[in-house]
Image: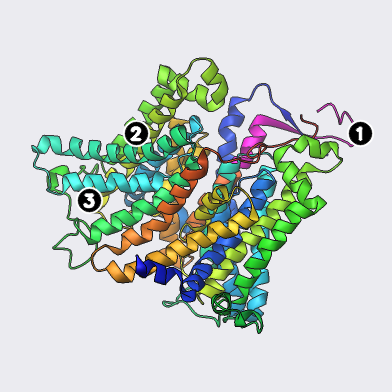
Amino acid sequence: MIRFEPRENVPPLLRLGAPVAAAIAALALAALPIMAAGAPVLDAYALMAKGAFGSLFAFSELLARATPLVLTGLAAALAFRARLWNIGGEGQLYAGALAAVAVGSGALALPPLLMVPAVVVAGALAGGLLMLVPALLKVRLGADEVVTTLLLNFIVLLFVQMMLEGPMKDPMGMGWPQSEPMLEEATLPKLMARMRVHAGLLIALVAALVVHVLLKRTVWGFEIRAVGENQDAARHAGIPVTATFLRVALMSGALAGLAGVGEVAGLKGYLTADLSPGFGYAGIVVAMLAGLSPLGVVVAALFIAGVFVGADSMSRAIGVSNYLADLVVATSLIAVLVSGLFVRYRVRLVRRGQGGSAA
Amino acid sequence: MIEILDILASPNFWAAALRIATPLIFGVLGALLCERAGVLNLGIEGIFTAGAMAGWMAAWLGAGLWGGVAVAALAGAGFGLLHAVLTVPLGLSQHVSGIGVTLFATSLSYYAYRTALPDVTSPPRITAFQPLDIPLLSDLPFIGTVLSQQTALTYLALAMVVVVGFVLYRTPLGLAIRAVGDNPSAVEAQGLSVTVLRMATIVAGSALMALGGAFLTMSAFDAFFFGMVNGRGWICIALTVFASWRPGKALIGALLFGAFDAFQVRLQTEVGAFVPGQVFLMLPYLLSIAALVVVARKADYPRAMLKPYFKGQR
């Protein structure tokens, strides 16, 4: 019989090692679907590694892909810390992107120096306000935020499509449903010549630092952690639980909104309805791999970005479907969930009848 | 106003409503079973996708339509077992595990489809379930016209409402399932295993969810498309709360939802020229949120829902 005994002290090495082991396990398990596709397994892995790290260009692609994942990962990590289940990162990302385009594609005449800050603030605000809706429905009316944030993802995407086929459609876009391009001065600068990695990465890294300090060093951070650990105890201790939820919702939504800003203002230059290949959902995996630690999110985002970029490149080379990347991402979420068990508990094999009922 | 009444009085309208409601009936029944046993199953969206893909694929490979339905149910049961293992004996977060199962089931289905059919541009079609004419039933006025336009899977969904209702309220097994979601230590005191009861219920509920997916590819349409589930699973989770975890109310909720959806399709043909199509497509999701908000305050969640249970615990 297997018994789980709670650990009193978790060795720090185990805490760090468990998600790494989960990521490696998820990558290793990908051998099965690669084999099922009839492709050479070792070649596929080599091609994935080359596609993610093999050249300066590959590395730039990796960083560009990691940028939105850091931000949606932070959005999920911060919300989950307070046990606010924000599964709406995808919708908040699109809301941020839509607001960024609305401000940055010529509708607003601002001095060039103010343009980028205005775009960034608009995107963050749109994401934050969007997340405020399910948070208010939760604290005021008791409606479960998991379902409302999930359903809002579909509503926002339809709204974006409506805007792109209607009032925000680019008249010069040859009939394609896409927005007008961002103005030159509203665009985030590229970090390297002829590479796609852009200043959104710096925003993402600063955001990770800010969330880290917020959680570790501020009263708000303490309140967020207290609410997440035990909502009732926090309320009894006089912590403003409702205000904390609303604050977290605003900040979490804003972070996901910033991911959308980066994608339109840094990478694509205009908005289409297929801007995100599921960055909002992948952000949940990033947050869980990071153990909800803001600095860990950066590392986890690099891993997930590597899987996406590597699988894309491998898929082009030998034709294994790039849904393999989504499969690895999903597997690593399940693996890290299980690995968490080994962090919190010592697993013992006990012979039947031996100290059984004392548990 | 007269026009609305005309629409509501037409059997064809209710036939469409019942068709739209069918996958939701399967989904809500599956979700309410899991939740009655105390476990939220957010794997539903992925399980729908897996059921849709696996059922269609089996039928396309020559297993026959009912063979496809069986394969879909098995696929659902498999992913349900995964969620059950993660959440019941291991006691991991039901939210995160469910999202994990959805991501896993969805990506595995898409990967399998792409791997089996690498180069197709238009999805291959099967011969889907045809409307089933049951002699005496279809002679009934009104109801007969509504039912005679439905396929066998809709009849199966209606039968499952009765079966799930009977099992939950009229059998010792149902009593145990309901108790395990309300007061698991009492169940254990009776000498029953909380773990086995919960896991078996999740597996059965997930198989039902997968039938909802199978309906999409084998009755509503005759092919598999990426993204075709399109949030139906999440809508079922909202409708489960709306139905206060009762099979009869689940049928009513799904039918109301189907009626609303069928109505907006008619409306679209009337005023579609003035209102963008996306507004109509948003309505089902908005309605689901509204349904959830309306009942949220008085929703009577199974008391042990979301709470893992370990042997010997009080």
At x 73%, y 53%, the residue is B168
Question: Label 3 belongs to which residue?
Answer: A194
Neighbour tally class for label 2: few under 14, some 14-19, many 20 plus, Cα within 10 Å: some
Rendering coords of residue A325 (x, y %): 48, 55
Q: Chain of mark 3?
A: A
Rendering coords of residue A194 (x, y %): 22, 51
At x 57%, y 82%, the residue is B130
Judge left or right: residue A215 versus residue B267.
right
Q: Are marks 1 and 3 on the same chain?
A: yes
Q: Amino acid at mark 3?
A: Arg
- Would you place residue B81 above or below residue A350 in this image? below
Rendering coords of residue A210 (x, y %): 36, 26
Rendering coords of residue A121 (x, y %): 24, 35
Q: Amino acid at mark 2?
A: Leu
Q: Are marks 2 and 3 on the same chain?
A: yes
**Is residue A7 something one can see in this rendering?**
yes
Residue A353: assigned label = 1
Question: Label 2 belongs to which residue?
Answer: A205
Q: Which residues are magenta?
A: A337-359
**Sooner in the amino-acid sequence: mark 1 or mark 3:** 3
Residue B155 falls in which quadrant of the image? bottom right
Classify the position of the N terminus of chain B by image quarter. bottom left
- Say if the magenta span includes residue B138: no
Judge left or right: residue B142 versus residue A153.
right
Q: Amino acid at mark 1?
A: Gly
